[in-house]
Image (cartoon, rainbow, N blue to C red):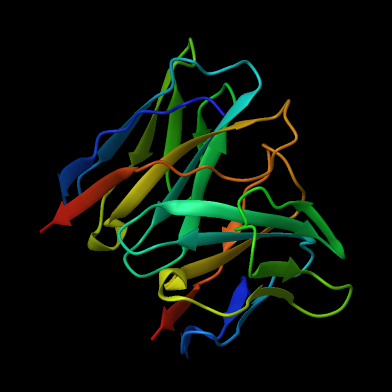
Amino acid sequence: DAKTTQPNSMESNEEEPVHLPCNHSTISGTDYIHWYRQLPSQGPEYVIHGLTSNVNNRMASLAIAEDRKSSTLILHRATLRDAAVYYCILRDAAGTASKLTFGTGTRLQVTL
Amino acid sequence: NAGVMQNPRHLVRRRGQEARLRCSPMKGHSHVYWYRQLPEEGLKFMVYLQKENIIDESGMPKERFSAEFPKEGPSILRIQQVVRGDSAAYFCASSLDHGAPYEQYFGPGTRLTVT
């Protein structure tokens, strides 16, 4: 799987939007961009995924750069419950592997 | 629709004992994955199973670890003769189908402590 680069940590104030960046300059044309998060002492949680177009769901939005070499996970209004480690993961649709390969992610702190 | 269920949530075993971790996937999901998170480390893939078949076990330690997903019942991750280094959180995930377009849903994990 192609490599992703994320900042180690970010901080946000509650009720404000958060933009979590992910660089994936070696992405291939068949790589899907997935985001998961892990809240403290819990299992990972699926957030969103996309291929080329921007995506929205009830949890977040995913903005994908036109050249696909980077993407941004957008939490529209951060709450204390959004404090977690966020993982950006590439998954190759052309390959046979089904596993998720987690990196170190971005630890998001949300303060009042 | 219940999510992925794992039990027990916490398991304490003495060195040399066996540990059995259970995972019931989401309803309608026939693809199950096991991941391990060692203390202060990241999540690592262990094994991927479909009903009655092991598809990818590239992350499983070569000895003492085995996994199954029978036709009926939950998936089981079995660790024989546990050692202190097996202490970790073990997460199970399931998906509707395999491959990149499909998201995985995780259970709450089993925290194994080996004394």
Q: Which residue occupies 52% across, 25% down?
A: A2
Say above or below: A11 vs B49. above
Q: Which residue occupies 62% across, 78% down?
A: B80
Say above or below: A72 vs B112. above
Residue B112 can be seen in this image? yes
Image coords of residue A36 (percent x, y): 46, 48
Q: Nearer the viewer, residue B74 or A55?
A: B74
How many numbered marks are there?
Answer: 0
Q: Which quadrant would residue B84 be assigned to in this image?
A: bottom left
Residue B26 can be seen in this image? no
Image coords of residue A100 (percent x, y): 57, 45
Image coords of residue A55 (percent x, y): 52, 33
Q: Nearer the viewer, residue A44 or B13?
A: B13
Q: Nearer the viewer, residue B103 or B33?
A: B33
Image coords of residue B66 (percent x, y): 70, 68
Say above or below: A6 vs B98. above
Q: Which residue occupies 56% across, 23% down?
A: A53
Q: Nearer the viewer, residue B47 or A98?
A: B47
Q: Which residue occupies 75% across, 46% down?
A: B98
